[in-house]
Amino acid sequence: MFYFTICETRHLISYTMIRKFYTLLLCIFLFYPTMQLKAQETVTDIDGNTYTTVTIGTQTWMAENLRVTKYSNGDAIGEEQDAGTWAGLTTGAYCWYENNYTTYGATYGALYNWYAVADSRNICPTGWHVPSDAEWFTLENYVDPTIDNPNATEWRGT
């Protein structure tokens, strides 16, 4: 769902969430033949971007990276291209990988700081939300049932 450049944890999605995402991708690609994955319908964000969804176990996830530029109420999320300014922000913002939407936007989606992700106006399409740690754990546990500690901060699973 997200690709992030790590600058500082308080400004971007945490390293733990990134690690979980990459672990999930690796597990999906490695175990895809044995997992019960069902392609679902699509969901459309406020900008008109359409995303494919996938059901993994009992949960439905977006199968593409978010690239919305507005909160779900229509308010604009600020775009910031300067790394120095980005690091000091205390409001929601997004950028494109290498500041190049044309080349990377469709592949990587937008990169959001934590303020945008946590904002009550919601960056997700209507009816969707940013997954909680418990929801990540449910997904991880479906992919690797040997995971037994949802609060572990190191790599978990096999």
Image: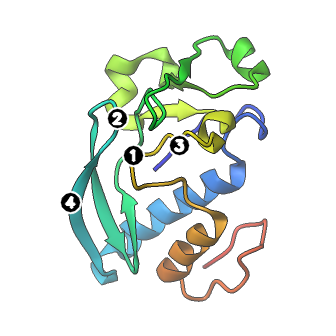
Residue 125: mark: 1
Q: Residue at x 71, y 76 (%)?
A: 150
**Residue 149, located in which quarter of the rendered image?**
bottom right
Residue 46: mark: 2
Q: Is residue 24 left or right of residue 107?
A: right
Residue 112 drawn above or below residue 128: above
Circle 3 residues within 10 Å: few <14, some 14–19, many ≥20: some
Amino acid at dot 3: Asn
In three-dimensional space, the C-alpha distance between marks 2 and 1, rounded to whole angstroms, equals 7 Å
**Residue 37, located in which quarter of the rendered image?**
bottom left
Q: Residue at x 67, y 38 (%)?
A: 114
Q: In x, y percent, where is residue 153?
A: 78, 66
Mark closest to the chain's N terminus, 4 or 3: 4
Q: Are marks 2 and 1 in contact (CB under 8 Å)?
A: yes
Mark closest to the chain's N terminus, 4 or 1: 4
Front: mark 4 or 1: 1
Element marked by disc 4: strand
Mark closest to the chain's N terminus, 3 or 2: 2
In three-dimensional space, the C-alpha distance between marks 3 and 2, rounded to whole angstroms, equals 11 Å
**Residue placed under numbered mark 3 in the picture:** 122
